[in-house]
Image: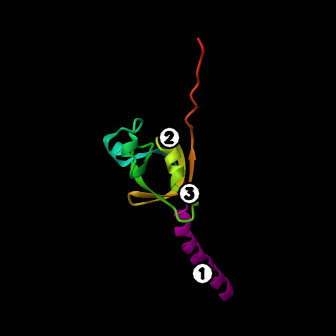
Amino acid sequence: MRRTALLAAALAAAALVAGPAAAQAPAPIKGRIVGLKCAQKGKIGECYLKWAEPMVLVNEDGDFYTIALGTASGLRPEQLDVAFGQEVEVKGRIVGETIELYALSVLRPVAGKEFFKG
């Protein structure tokens, strides 16, 4: 009987420890990467490159978060440059007004220019 109670207590403690870790797991978020000034002015689809710093993620609800690259993500700042102005899906953890990115994928890459004769 005592052994069962000890086992139940150990399982409950493990669930308490695993609970916060599971809650902090990166969640997928869709949005667009633009500059902070563009997000503040509502110029999401037409952001000037000179307003690119600092970069933010604007989600589908219009909320925006300053981007920080997660330490274990392996993402490089150049990947943010490629995704600037594009619709993206990211995995990250929101901490206050910052999102720590762990994964980034561009949903609709810019198509190359096409030239037609005629």
Quarter where residue 98 is shown: bottom left
**Which numbered circle lies on residue 9?**
1
Is 11 placed left or right of 101 in the picture?
Answer: right
Q: What residue is drawn where x is 62% and y is 81%? A: 10
Please say if the residues under marks 3 and 1 sit with CB atoms less than 8 Å apart: no
Dot 3 alpha-carbon crowd within 10 angstroms: few under 14, some 14 to 19, many 20 or more: some
Location of the C terminus by quadrant is top right
Q: Position of residue 114 (x, y in %)?
A: 59, 24
Q: Amino acid at mark 1?
A: Ala
The quarter of the image holding the N terminus is bottom right
How far across and how far down the image is residue 69, in percent? 50, 59
In space, the residues marked 1 and 2 are separated at their CA atoms by 49 Å
What type of secondary structure mainly makes up the magenta span?
A: helix
Q: Where is residue 35 drawn, in percent x and y?
A: 39, 46
The answer to which of marks 1 and 2 sits earlier in the sequence is 1
Q: Residue placed farthest to the left in the image?
A: 41
Instruction: Left or right? Give the position of 36 relative to 72.
Output: left
Q: Secondary structure at mark 3?
A: loop
x and y percent of residue 38 in the render? 36, 43
Nearer to us in this view, 38 or 22: 38
Quickly name the residue at label 3. Answer: 75
Closer to the chain start, of discs 2 and 3, is 3
| Mark 2, other Cα within 10 Å: few <14 / some 14–19 / many ≥20 | many
**Residues marked 2 and 3 touching at CB (< 8 Å):** no
Q: For mark 2, what is the residue?
A: 86
Q: Which residues are magenta?
A: 1-28
Is 4 on the left-hand or right-hand side of 40? right
Q: Residue furthest top?
A: 118
- Nearest-to-viewer mark from 3 and 1: 3
Q: Is residue 84 magenta?
A: no
